[in-house]
Image (cartoon, rainbow, N blue to C red):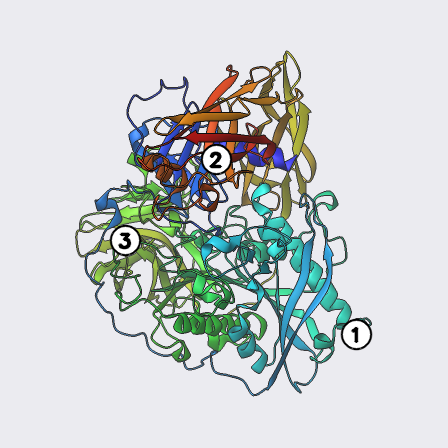
Amino acid sequence: MRRIMVAAVAASALLPGAPAPAWADPPAPSASAPPPGWSVDHKTLTWTSDRPIPPGDAAVEFWSGDRLLGRAEGAPDLRTFVLPGSRPGKLADLRVRIGGKRVDAAAPRPARRRAATPPPATPALPPNPVDPGVKGPYRTTSGEYTLPSVQLKEYPAPVEMQAVVVAPVNAPGRRPLALFLHGRHWTCYSGDDLNSITLDWPCAAGARAVPSHRGYLQAQELLASQGYVTVSISANGINAQDNDVPDLGAQARSSLVRMHLAHWADWSGSGRGSAPAVVRSAPRADLSQVLLMGHSRGGEGVSRAALDSLTPPPAAQDDYHGAVRWTIRGLLLIGPTAFGQNPHPDVPSATILPGCDGDVADLQGQMYVDATRGLGSGRALHSALYVVGANHNYFNTEWTPGQAAGPAVDDFFSDEPDPLCTPGVAPARLTPAQEQTVGATYIAAAARLFVGGDDRARPLLDGSGVRAPSAGPARVLSHAVGGNRSPVIVPDRSTSVRDGRVCEEAPDDPESACLSGDPTSGGSPHFVPFSVPEPGRYAVAFGGTATATLRPAKAMPVAGARALALRLVVPPNAPATSFGVAVTDDRGRRTTLGTATVTGVPGTGWTASYWAQEVRLPLPRDIRAVARLDVTPHTGGPAWLIDAWGWRPGTPAPRPAALDRVDVGGVTVDEGDSGTRTYRVPVTAYGRLTAHVRLFLTDPATYETKSWVAAIKPGSTRLTVPITVVGDDTYGGDKAYALTAKALRNAVVGDYTGGVYATEDEPMPTITFTPDSASAAEGTSLTWTATLSEAAGDSLYLLLVPQAPASSPELSSTDVDPEWFSAFSGEEPTPSRPLSGTGLQLFTVIEPGTTSATIEVPTVSDGVAEGFEHVRFQAFVFPPDFGDQIPVGTIDGTVTD
């Protein structure tokens, strides 16, 4: 069922974070030509990159202007990406984004650059008195264990149970446990360059597995020296298969984490004797004191593991069925994905946002802070750490060139040297060693605060404006919500604003948007959408120098607060910008608090640098409640208030609220041969409260998305979803009508995607090729015809891959039209080489309602007597949902002089 959902998501942009077009009538095809690298055939878009794009954590998205068309599927050549079922609108405005970053060749120059020179240097932050990056007193020991692989739901290949352990030597008593989970990376390699990498599992004969789980040894060694037992687990089997499930692997990673924790619970108790040798050589782990670290999709995975540990999933959708015998005290996330935007608000977290992230470039991990507001008890601290000059990959040594066992790359890319992020050009760009030291230091800071309860580490995480000396020259900025904070202004529809405006963070109308301009270049992590439009998310925008007056719906209590903390955004690289701040209490007394000063985060057009910085102003003790906040910009530039809080020092123990768990279900139905039907989709809440969630429903036929707030009472609630499924007797592939959910109040959301899945009940037409063996004179085209046994109701996609022919010599890259070769291979034709040794891949579409398509290989005349030259192609067909390819035979050709 989920496979169907993923296919429709690729075609219709239905996953959260994907704004769906809302056309009443499909537009007529554009007569304009597509930009370089694009090809369009009926409803199919294909984009070929001019450089390899290895598998990463962020999705490859196709856009038409500011409208997201969908998430594209990549071909094995690492350059070709295909999106079926899309209506592209204006062909001249097609764009490609990966993690919010525009990567296609036609990106306009102004959108690519915001700063032509390095951002100005700023004074170093003062050191924190306690430095968690300092090595502890214990020697360490290390080793690996491998357990039998596990079978996860909807993952055909078993997933490995492998980990590297680093532990202290002679540490007394039971020791806290830190578990690490890497993100999505290629899984196998057989050589030294990117041409040898694959996303297979298990690896093919002769290939080696990428040891991503060994990439955090520096952080493991540091924590082990401080008395932690550490384990870093491998998830290659999930990485190779997670694009085939709607949540992109979050639930599977959660299950894998909890399976390892269950083993550690056994090994720390009566099952000690059966533990692997490296575990027996380590101190017993204290499972009541667990820290989880996740990188990239691993970050979303450990966040889901924390949620699933506090509110277990329905048994039918989970792969772990044992008791929860551990307590997760906190999370440290590095460049995480947040496709579901569903953090647990009562599990403390710190999220590293790499300023030069070239993979999850929109820094959507900010949602592990912002999306917790108003959901839980508010006592758990949620911190964001913006690391200037850090990329995505170098936090893991196995993803770092010069350190990795296999091929590795710098994920940051720009077509010209970038003054902030290009190594060797940008003074602020961190070296791999510096970046890995930052990661280890702040992992240790999170452990010290969340697990060790040492409040002296809190200022490194909570916006107090200090640094860890052991992190070296790295500039790490922080802000936080939760902890000892009480809300003063969290903008919503009830917030009254004068001489400013309440703006929308994720609208479909640019007039109401907080941040205008090209949404495919730069941007703000605070405004990353779950869906577009996403009502209910607001900030306050300032412009000019008039005093902006903000009033909450009621006076907000701040008794005991020592300061007013504001999260303020100014444009990247902005000079020191000051704001006068005053409050009026519930008795009408106005008090001037002072001046808040913010300097823009370093940024260019390639970075997401509209990021809020925390500033605090002392709050007199006699102010018991705030009824009005006045903000006076002292310059005329734009600025935004994300929120304002009453703040006091300290870290209260998180006390999980009794939140309901909400899961969106799915209904699988046969399409049928005729007639229409309406179906009901189960949305289930487990708990004692009435859960409030926002539901999003997208119709794949019209691309129209609607949303509404649902109040779900405890127990099982079936919502009536007005979905019409039209039956027919023509093959057209499976279709999905996606229903997604995001928590608003009294709830957390686990399985956030579901809906109605209409399966195709007609067989796919058979495909034949004529002739079996084509011939052509040099300088003309080899031509074949692919014929269907009957017309299909949707597109079928043919892929032809050259193989070594039975006879030689083989047609070469210089025997065919050079422009044609480059368009279908992404390579230059010279030096001359056999076609089977190139990245050539031919994509051909058989359009709906038709029964044939022509395949051509244009040759060139070189005037050299060569005799017969031969070519062979292996043909595959993809169904309309661009699911698994199906081999449909081979075709041969001969070129004569």
Q: Is residue 885 left or right of residue 817?
A: right
View extreme (top): residue: 675
Q: In which quadrant of the rendered image does the N terminus lie?
A: top right
The quarter of the displayed image where residue 291 is located: bottom right
Instruction: Give residue 590's mark.
Output: none
Percent coordinates x, y for residue 312 in the rendering? 69, 51
Query: Mark 3 and mark 1 in contact (Cβ < 8 Å)?
Result: no
The residue at which mark 2 appears reads as 870
> How many marks do you count on the picture?
3
Instruction: Give residue 272's mark.
Output: 1
| Residue 657, visible in the rendered structure | no
Percent coordinates x, y for residue 137 in the rendering? 56, 88
The residue at which mark 3 appears reads as 630
| Residue 137, visible in the rendered structure | yes
Image height of 594 relative to 310, above or below: below
The front one of 817 and 75 is 817
Residue at 29 percent across and 60 percent down: it is 601
